[in-house]
Amino acid sequence: MRKLLTCAVPALWLLTHLTLSAPYIQEKSIIDDLGEIHILGSPPERIISLAPNITEILFALGLEEKIVGVTRYCNYPINARTKTRIGGLVDPDLEKIIHLQPDLVIAYRGNPLNLVHRLKDLGLPVFVLEAGTTVESALHLIERIGVVTRKEKASQGLIARLKKNYKKIRDRLANADIRPKVFINLHGKGLWTCGKNTFLNDMVLKAEAINIAGEVDRAWFNYNREELIHQNPDYIVVITKSKEDFLDVKTWFKEQSHLGSIKAIQNENIFLLNEDLVTRLGPRIFEAFEQLARILHSSSFEAGI
Amino acid sequence: MTAGKKRAQILAILLILLVCGFYLSLTKGSVKTTFSDLWDFFAHNNQTHAQIFIHLRLSRALLAFLVGASLSLSGAILQGYFQNPMAGPFVVGVSSGASFGAVLALILGLNMSIWGFSLQNVFAFCSGFAIVSLVYILSLRTGAFKVETLLLTGIAAGALASSLTSFLIFFKSESFEQAVFWLLGSFHLADWNQIRVILSTFVLGIIISQWLAKDMNLLVMGDEIARSLGCSVNRTRKIFLIVSTLLASSSVSVSGIIGFVGLIVPHWVRLIIGPDHRYLFFASSLTGGVFLMFCDLLARTVLAGSELPIGIITAAVGAPFFIYLLNKRR
């Protein structure tokens, strides 16, 4: 009996110890935005980013050293340009990706779905993120990337900072008495714009303004000229890569004689927002938001700053 | 037999080109690899190299070969069938019909698959076949079977299918990137499931068409003569139509619309070895396969850092050579 006890006690102790520590032995996992399980092992050492906003988030979380590949569009921060290019968002070079032997590939829904599946079939650890339809989705992306790269602390810090600034600007806008009408111009000369369910539309709304194309149930499309004249926007915000392109578009708008009755054109309320800043759901989206708010509600910002 | 000797020569050249094509496809790519890397992979089964050589380069080269072979065989059948050099999977509306089916399946979010055969393949075949049947029935209704009516109806039906495809893409812009893939054609995402699909339809197609090649030779002489020589014209015509549709639509469903190959390769081959379908079918398949494999090799290696759409290469390489052959003939 005593013999049995001397055996049983350590055995029991071992058993309880094992069952208690089991969750810690087992690897943690996370479900990505595609609904697939992603195992969280040790912190990733070789990360490939498949989109510029993801690259910007990785840099902001201090993961510069761990990035081994970025897309040809990743140009910010400046050091992103020194990283190996793996191709574009739609046509990344699969050979190069495999050759770089990544232990984490971060994709998002702007990458075609069949591409994502192909990467997974090749045995690559791909983590997929939702594309996002609001300004705040940038925070969601930062949080998810923080978890999957095991940089939770850094990401929480960054989110808190961004939220604070964001709130400051929104507070200033809270007592704006008018909500101006805005036309967002994309892709240079012409009337390409953004409709419902785009984060750009959301940004305009959060900046206490009205996107005149915001009622249209399409994402990116060519706006109707007659509708533009009828809506008569107070502001035209031109989204281009450079100042030169912006000036071209501005001149183009002023030269269109049939658009002469539009308030934004009469009052020269045509402004530039940098394309890289405003089209990437990363930390800098809040800078873009602040710039937009300052354009549309300059009076709210006159006092101070 | 000089004709036999010439055929043997051409076969030898094609086989040499085939081997070279596979060798180059395996060793060339954006990641620099040498023969010793290939050896290293065979000898030591290096994992990274296994992925690059087998799952990326070999699968891609094989897929390009099989799609080229299928499209050319489909074109060779259709040109014999219609006795018209303008015929090809594009002209009779098969390609447009099949791409409509593929895009429709994509937009409806149907991605089930059994044994590598996905609903996309099924949709592509069904709608390709629907277009061809429609064209066939419409051209029969005008009285006697007329080749011109069939070709013109085919062009019209193809245009209709293309416009429906564009509408679908416009309607659901989130699938835009993937839908464009079908319109431009690419082997970028080649995998073994696609190879399984196209390999099975190609093997079926080449066996049936070789088996009926003699009858095709009779059909070319005209339905009356063929009938008097003991060929059951209607049955043969139906089988050939189904086979060529199957070949073209399974090509479209795995790699999108790749133009020019199905039209031009059978012409090359006919200009070189003559119009006997017993040899024409096989030679067209082999030539088309080798041609598309080399085109894809160029498409992925010419520009550093990005890929050229394969349609640019097929036309840029194919057209001048075609014009040269036509002129030499004259």
Image (tube, coloured by chain):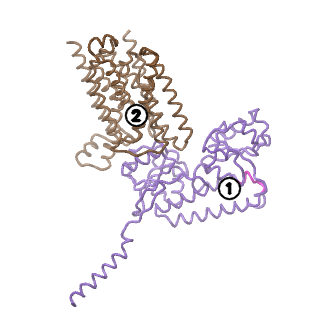
Chain colours: A purple, B brown
A244 with respect to B225 (left or right): right
**Location of residue B140 by image quarter:** top left
Q: Amino acid at mark 2?
A: Phe
Query: What's the magenta region?
Result: A293-299
The answer to which of B271 and A210 lies nearer the viewer is A210
Magenta span includes A296: yes
**Location of residue B225 by image quarter:** top left
Task: Judge whether B149 appears above or below B313 on screen.
Answer: above
Residue at mark 2: B125
**Where in the figure is residue A249, as x and y percent of width and height?**
68, 38
In this view of the protein, can residue A256 be seen by the observer? yes
The answer to which of B35 and B194 lies nearer the viewer is B194
A262 with respect to A43 (left or right): right
In this view of the protein, can residue B300 be seen by the observer? no
Magenta span includes B41: no
- In the structure shown, which secondary structural element does the residue marked by tag 1 occupy? helix
| Circle 1 residues within 10 Å: few <14, some 14–19, many ≥20 | some
| Circle 2 residues within 10 Å: few <14, some 14–19, many ≥20 | many
Residue that extends furthest to the top in the rendered view of this protein: B330
Tell me the chief SS of the magenta region. helix
Query: Callout 1: residue from which chain?
Result: A
The answer to which of B310 and B98 lies nearer the viewer is B98
Whether labels 2 and 1 belong to a single chain: the reply is: no
B239 with respect to A257 (left or right): left
Which quadrant: the N terminus of chain B? top left
The Cα–Cα distance between marks 2 and 1, rounded to whole angstroms, is 48 Å
**Where in the figure is residue B83, as x and y percent of width and height?**
38, 15
